[in-house]
Image (cartoon, rainbow, N blue to C red):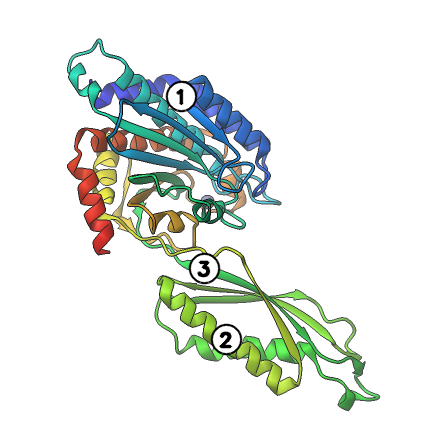
């Protein structure tokens, strides 16, 4: 038994995996509505002898598929997404992720099930593979909902992949994120005839923007704050009675995000006091956690990337920027999210859509499958890796 045999098994599945990804690409489905993709992926896993549970973790399009080699040993999770962006299609490479996870899982199963090869005694090593289908990464963060409903806690290790630019890297921190929708309510009046009777909701909103700008100087590095106007105010000769805005707060630190939120709420309150208006603050149900890096697992990933000859970023472990619900998995279980070369343009761009079914998409898929399979193989045959990953998790 060797890793070469494992990679060969993935090569043999290449056409089928890419066909699966292409079908997901051709039928893009938004967050929480990935019915066709989930069905396709679940059926593929079932056909390969995995035990599939559909509609888990409070989400209709989430699934869990398991296969065990004997009893006991580590339970290794591999997570895949399959949601598209609402009006763009697959502009983030999520169509490649779960077919890659399936390729890796099936190769591991086939290799360890077979016993007529040299070194077959290793096949007796017990372990479980759990493929998690995780919807709605781009919108409400399906993994957050799934985690709240008990998913991932049974795992010893969680792995995942994501498409990136020209060179591979392993994701260190991502940013914790929380979004808000604020509705300011004032009092309408004729802007020329009786402005003194009006209380402008638009003024309150603009003051809140200014408040954020002044706060920006006095926050820790790694903080991001953005806002947009969600609803226009109407004609300029009427004092606006209603104004709505969207706000996003991000930090590399989960606890610091809560501090920011408190200060943000004071800004809204202050804006209302100054303008004699009121505000209703709606918060997103899910808060994206900052991803907790695991250097022990990152090393295993980098070693496998080297073996595969995938070009690696000079900073092989680095922050990925932005926010991901994989962060909420990383605070439950030691984890690694590996980024594989796909397209030089930035994510969510038309170039990423255009690359969806090209050779670079295929190579991203195959490398994703192989790096995950290689990591699982190393973890299964070297139990101290699980221990190291756990120790690293406990100290971070
Ligand atoms: Zn993405």
Q: CA distance from mark 2 to mark 1?
A: 50 Å
Does residue 299 appear left or right of residue 219 in this picture? Answer: left
Mark nearer the viewer, 1 or 3: 3
Residue ID for mark 1: 14
Q: Tell me which numbered mark, 1 or 3, is placed earlier along the sequence.
A: 1
Residue at image location 15% in from the left, 16% down from the top? 119
Q: Can residue 169 be seen at all in this image of the molecule?
A: no
Q: Tell me which numbered mark, 2 or 3, is placed earlier along the sequence.
A: 3
Does residue 201 appear left or right of residue 263 in this picture? Answer: right
Residue 159, how many percent across, how many down? 33, 39
Residue ID for mark 2: 212
Q: Are marks 2 and 3 in contact (CB under 8 Å)?
A: no
**Mark 3 near ligand 1 (CB under 8 Å)?**
no
Quarter containing the N terminus: top left
Residue 45, how many percent across, how many down? 44, 23
Above or below, 356 relative to 266: above
Q: Can residue 51 be seen at all in this image of the molecule?
A: yes
Q: CA distance from mark 2 to mark 3?
A: 16 Å
Foreground residue among 77 and 319: 77
Mark nearer the viewer, 2 or 1: 2
Residue 368, how many percent across, how many down? 35, 33
């Amino acid at each position: 038994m060797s890793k070469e045999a494992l990679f060969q098994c993935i090569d043999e599945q290449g056409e089928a995996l890419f066909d699966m990804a292409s079908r997901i690409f051709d039928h893009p489905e938004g967050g929480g509505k990935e019915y066709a993709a989930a069905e396709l992926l679940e059926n593929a896993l079932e056909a390969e002898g995995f035990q599939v549970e559909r509609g888990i973790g409070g989400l209709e399009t989430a699934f869990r598929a398991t296969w065990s080699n004997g009893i006991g040993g580590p339970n290794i999770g591999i997570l895949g997404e399959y949601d598209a962006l609402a009006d763009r299609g697959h502009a983030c490479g999520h169509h490649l992720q779960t077919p890659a996870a399936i390729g890796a899982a099936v190769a591991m199963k086939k290799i360890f099930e077979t016993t007529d090869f040299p070194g077959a005694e290793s096949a007796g090593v017990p372990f479980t593979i759990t493929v998690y289908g995780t919807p709605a990464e781009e919108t409400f963060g399906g993994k957050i909902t799934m985690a709240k409903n008990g998913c991932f806690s049974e795992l010893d290790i969680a792995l995942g992949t994501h498409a990136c630019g020209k060179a591979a890297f392993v994701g260190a921190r991502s940013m914790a994120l929380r979004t808000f929708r604020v509705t300011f309510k004032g009092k309408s009046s004729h802007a020329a005839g009786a402005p003194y009777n009006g209380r402008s909701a638009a003024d309150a909103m603009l003051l809140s923007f200014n408040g954020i700008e002044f706060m920006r100087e006095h926050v820790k590095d790694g903080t991001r704050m953005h806002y947009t106007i969600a609803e226009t105010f109407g004609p300029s000769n009427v004092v606006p009675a209603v104004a709505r805005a969207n706000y996003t707060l991000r930090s590399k630190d989960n606890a610091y995000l809560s501090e920011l939120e408190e200060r943000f709420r004071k800004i809204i309150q202050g804006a209302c006091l100054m303008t004699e208006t009121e505000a209703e603050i709606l918060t997103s149900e899910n808060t994206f956690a900052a991803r907790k890096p695991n250097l022990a697992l990152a090393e295993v990933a980098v070693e496998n990337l080297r073996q595969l000859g995938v070009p690696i970023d000079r900073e092989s472990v680095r922050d990925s920027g932005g926010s991901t619900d994989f962060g909420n998995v990383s605070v439950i279980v030691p984890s690694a999210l590996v980024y594989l070369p796909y397209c030089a343009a930035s994510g969510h761009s038309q170039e990423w859509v255009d690359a969806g079914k090209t050779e670079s998409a295929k190579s991203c898929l195959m490398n994703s499958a192989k790096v995950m399979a290689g990591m699982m193989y190393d973890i299964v045959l070297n139990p101290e890796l699980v221990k190291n990953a756990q120790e690293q998790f406990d100290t971070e």
